[in-house]
Image (cartoon, rainbow, N blue to C red):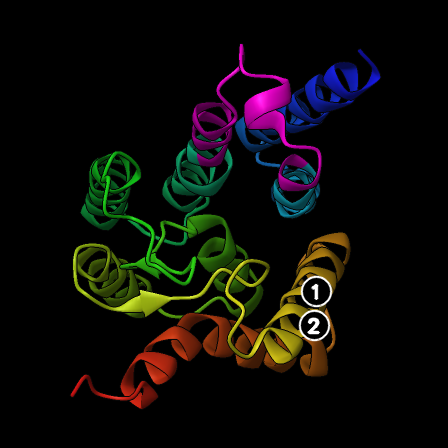
């Protein structure tokens, strides 16, 4: 009985992500972008912790009434896609038609990707960019690039969702995990720092956020290129 309750408590922990997404959305509606991203960072931390807990406590067999994968996908779509897309659209970073283009492309492409049964690779990485628009958005808010740069990035990453390009899961992808996991933790701290500082963070934080983002974005492709070819 204790093992069953413990397993269901993991589902309850995962479900708090929906609460944090609502708090982030309320902040976004009021254009409180720093507060929005702080809540998204909290949701990101929950998402990073609940998976290992679910596997450790065998939630699939001990708490089968709730589909943990579906629960996680629903929350991920809110926190990774829907709210960041709204922020890009309503923040002024993308003026006029560019905002409409970004919000339509991001939400449309991402919902198809999240439903793709080929999303995961054998080594627990992702095939295609895994729709982490929350990570993209916080870097864009921190760096404030020209809108053409943002538009190009949105277009490239949306296409990359459906290409055979590997993107790591910092926790589950074992290859280079001793490097990738600390980088992901550092990225989370930097993102929280930038949001807490209302995106007036020191230059060192900005560049560190960019460097860690590039690593997390590209390391899977580097691994893919360096994999031994089948005989």
Percent of width and height locating residue 180: 59, 74
Q: Main secondary structure of the magenta part?
A: helix
- Residue in the image at 63% along x and 80% along y: 179
Does residue 228 appear left or right of residue 41 in this picture? left
Q: Is residue 160 left or right of residue 43?
A: left
Residue name at image x 53 percent, y 58 percent: 141
Of residues 64 and 185, the one drawn nearer to the viewer in this rendering? 64
Query: Quarter-wise, where is residue 187 in the image?
Result: bottom right
Q: Which residues are magenta?
A: 54-76
Q: Position of residue 231 (x, y in %)?
A: 16, 88
Which label number is shown at residue 59?
A: none
> In the rendered structure, does residue 82 fall within the stretch colored magenta?
no
Whether residues under marks 1 and 2 lie with C-beta atoms below 8 angstroms apart, the answer is: yes
Marking on residue 182: 2
Q: Quadrant of residue 110?
A: top left
Indicate which disc residue 185 carries. Answer: 1
User: Dot 2: what SS?
Assistant: helix
| Closer to us: 67 or 44 | 67
Instruction: Tell me what residue is drawn at x 38 percent, y 81 percent.
Output: 223
């Amino acid at each position: 009985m204790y093992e069953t309750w413990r397993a269901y408590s993991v589902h309850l922990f995962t479900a708090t992500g929906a609460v944090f997404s609502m708090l982030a959305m309320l902040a976004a509606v009021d254009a409180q972008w720093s507060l929005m991203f702080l809540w998204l960072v909290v949701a990101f931390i929950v998402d990073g912790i609940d998976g290992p807990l679910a596997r450790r406590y065998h939630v699939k067999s001990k708490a089968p009434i709730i589909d943990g994968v579906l629960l996680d996908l629903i929350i991920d779509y809110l926190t990774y896609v829907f709210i960041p897309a709204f922020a890009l659209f309503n923040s002024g970073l993308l003026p006029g038609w560019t905002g409409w283009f970004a919000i339509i492309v991001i939400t449309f492409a991402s919902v198809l990707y999240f439903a793709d049964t080929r999303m995961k690779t054998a080594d627990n990485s992702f095939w295609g960019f895994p729709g982490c628009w929350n990570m993209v958005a916080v870097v864009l808010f921190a760096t404030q690039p020209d809108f053409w740069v943002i538009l190009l990035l949105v277009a490239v990453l949306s296409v990359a969702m459906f290409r055979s390009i590997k993107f790591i899961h910092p926790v589950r992808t074992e290859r280079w995990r001793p490097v990738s996991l600390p980088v992901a933790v550092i990225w989370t701290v930097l993102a929280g720092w930038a949001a807490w500082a209302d995106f007036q963070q020191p230059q060192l934080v900005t560049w560190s956020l960019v460097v860690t983002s590039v690593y997390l974005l590209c390391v899977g492709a580097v691994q893919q290129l360096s994999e031994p070819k089948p005989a």
